[in-house]
Amino acid sequence: MPVDLQTAATALSNEEILRYSRHLIMPEVGMEGQQKLKAAKVLCIGTGGLGSPLALYLTAAGVGTLGLVDFDVVDYTNLQRQIIHSTPDVGRPKLDSAEEKLRALNPYVDIRKFETRLTSANALEIFRDFDVIVDGTDNFPTRYLVNDACVLTGKPNVYGSIFRFEGQASVFATKEGPCYRCLYPEPPPPGLVPSCAEGGVLGILPGLVGVIQATEAIKLILEAGEPLIGRLLLVDALAMNFRTLKLRKNPECPACGTHPTIKKLIDYEQFCGIPPAAAQQPAANANDMTPEELKRRLDAGEDLFVLDVREPNEYQIANLGGYLIPLGDLPKRVNELDSSREIVAHCKMGGRSAKAVDFLRQAGFKKVRNLAGGINAWSEKVDPKVPKY
Amino acid sequence: MKIHIPTPLRQYAEKKAALNVSGKTVAEGLKNLTVQHPDLKKHLFTDEGKLRSFVNVYVNDEDIRYLQNTDTAVKEGDDVSIVPSIAGGFDEPKL
């Protein structure tokens, strides 16, 4: 994007010249580059793990307008990696917490807050005023939504994704390059790929990947170097190994191919096989047992077999004294269970144990229930001495 | 060939990051891999035996969809990477 160095809108004040001096003396940025940054409008979807380093560095670098989309509230489990938020921010909206840090870091940046969940109804409208979209959402529906909205609006999508100690980054939806659907035409069915809340993530990893995304966003604005267009960067923090794989624009891509079939945003929850919110109300499930009911029946001395389907390392964090068979081992260890007894399965939040209950019912177990909300709900409703995690 | 196992699938491959398997094509390599580690099978293939659409396979740095798919020939010393989509990012799911 060409910049008129003389226009008042992007001309730098003496204070800004001092602030950005290490950029200005570098030929790859210089006065022209710094004014490009000042003219640029970047939208950061989320202010969590990836969004924290991203927003901090883009703000420090002097990106003129930074949009933030988030609707969440800071909680204690965020602080291990979401470095824009601090302990006193727990309970505050993430957007307010982030805005405060960013304004303190660089008052010359125009921070625009969108306190909403990104949806098919609002994405195009929100994207309209921005030049570059930075995505690192934690779920497939939003990922496909961001991708399609970027393709439809012609804005580059700076992508990052993380799991445990492995990350991916790329730049999608540029004119010449592939989009996320060229790489992955369809999402995995729900439940087959574990989320960070279930699988965990090394706290530093979103820092690494988020900073790569920030670097790519800056390069796109400066039109400098070789952005990750048509390349997928794989980061393995455990091996400390960075590899790039070639990505190609798929001529048959439904979003960005030669004959696109996606001409407007769709229902991404449905596309990802997630049932409508009404259908996933946990209370609607007859197999569920509340923590209070479990407590009452255990106290009454009833014969209940508590089955814990989490991983052994989670058992070490907190347990209810249940019999441990990780969900993945259940099929081959099902013979360890007595189908004549009433079984109450639990995990951390109730998702994996619901699958265990389904599996056991199909295997002929008649009396098997799921502890609604898992051990975290037990901690909240029955025994706060059991740590939540 | 050396097959690189992504983090989410390592739990089905004895926690290994990479495994050496024999085979002249990608299909043979993946078949031998799932023979050694049967739990991997349903994560890589559909019930009809096709590679799942959210699992990409690379020979060195090239996507097999742009080579000869699973018929792509593999030489001694080639790196085969399984690259599934991962979704982790900013926040934890609300469900």
Image (spheres, coloured by chain):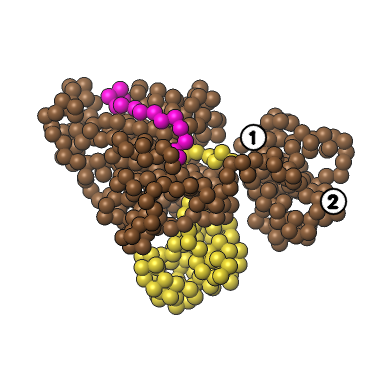
Chain colours: A brown, B yellow
Q: Residue at x 67, y 41 (%)?
A: A282
Magenta segment: A106-119
Tell me the chief SS of the magenta region: loop
Query: What label sits on residue A388 in the rendered view?
Result: 1
For residue A303, side relative to residue A66 (left or right): right
Q: Residue at x 54, y 25 (%)?
A: A91
Residue extending farthest to the left is A6
Residue extending farthest to the bottom is B24
Q: Residue flagged by tag 2: what amino acid is it? A: Arg
At label 2, counting other C-alpha atoms closer than 10 Å, the crowd grade (few under 14, some 14-19, many 20 or more) is: some
C-alpha separation, residue under disc 1 versus residue under disc 2: 28 Å
Q: Does residue A164 show up?
A: no
- x, y (%) of residue A25? 17, 34
Chain to which mark 1 belongs: A
Q: Residue at x 85, y 35 (%)?
A: A299
Q: Which residue occupies the foreground of this view, A43 or A98?
A: A43
Which quadrant does the N terminus of chain A fall into? top left
Q: Residue flagged by tag 1: what amino acid is it? A: Lys
Chain to which mark 2 belongs: A
Q: Which residue occupies the foreground of this view, B62 or A289?
A: A289
- x, y (%) of residue B83? 45, 59
At label 1, counting other C-alpha atoms closer than 10 Å, the crowd grade (few under 14, some 14-19, many 20 or more) is: some
* Residue designated by label 2: A341
Task: Inspect the magenta stretch and tell me whether residue A109 lies in it.
Answer: yes
Q: How many marks?
A: 2
Q: Are marks 1 and 2 on the same chain?
A: yes
Q: Residue at x 30, y 26 (%)?
A: A110
For residue A87, side relative to residue A172 (left or right): right
- x, y (%) of residue A332? 71, 62
Q: Secondary structure at mark 2?
A: loop
Q: Does residue A28 show up?
A: yes
Query: What label sits on residue A351 in the rendered view?
Result: none
